[in-house]
Image: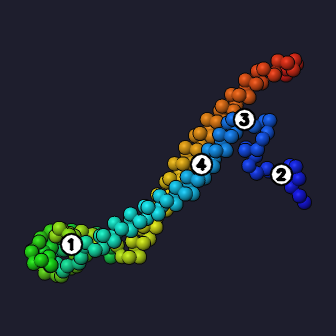
Amino acid sequence: MGRGRQGTKRFWRWRSNPLRRREDIAEAWVVLAMWLLVVVGGMTVGLVAAHATASTLDRQRTDRHSVHAVLLADVPRPASGKWSSGDKALAKVRWRSPDGSAHVDRTLVTPGLRAGSRVVVWEGGRGTLVTEPPSATEATLEAAVMGGLAALALAGSVCAAGAAVRRRLDQRRMAGWDREWDLVGPKWGHRTG
């Protein structure tokens, strides 16, 4: 069964039509610009955000290194019976940097360790304690997520702006129809209501 004359006409806003208004043409260009910005801009913003995130996380992996530290005091277990392996407690540790300088600071360690126990801590470029850098797989995943979120943020803002413009065009279209009806309506004579 063919689509016939009732089928949807593609690109109808750009075709010559006596019923087409300036607002219809403007809406067609707005929709085209929205799609281009969402596809091309979203892809560009996503790739830039993913690359920036990946380079930042790569820099963290090269700047941070693990060192062995010694606990300076016992780390008691929590008093409550609700303890999981993911719980950590703050404790004071001492370590030597690769250059030989001694440092003392507080870090999170597993509860229940005794003074003198050796723990692994991560040191930044300035000799301060930092968090463990993400692995290469975690960094890749995080970069992909950040790129996707940046692309979605751009797409959402473009769609919101496009919807606002299209709403304004609809308001102008409706106002034009009201003006024309005010001109044509009285010529019809009989009114209902």
Label 2 vs label 3: CA separation?
Answer: 21 Å
For the residues bearing labels 1 and 4, Cβ distance under 8 angstroms: no
Side of 93 where 132 appears, left or right = right
Residue at the spot 56% in from the left edge and 54% down from the top edge: 38
Viewer can see residue 116: yes
Indicate the position of residue 177 as horizontal and vertical percent values: 74, 29
SS label for mark 1: strand
N-terminal of the two: label 2 or label 4? 2
**Kind of residue at disc 3:** Arg
**Kind of residue at disc 1:** Glu
Task: Say which residue label 4 marks.
Answer: 33
SS label for mark 4: helix
Q: Residue 123 has which mark?
A: 1
Residue at the spot 79% in from the left edge and 39% down from the top edge: 17
Side of 41 where 62 appears, left or right = left
**Kind of residue at disc 2:** Gly
Q: Residue 27 has which mark?
A: none
For the residues bearing labels 3 and 1, Cβ distance under 8 angstroms: no
Residue at the spot 58% in from the left edge and 40% down from the top edge: 164
Label 1 vs label 4: CA separation?
Answer: 49 Å
Task: Say which residue label 2 marks.
Answer: 7
Task: Say which residue label 3 marks.
Answer: 21
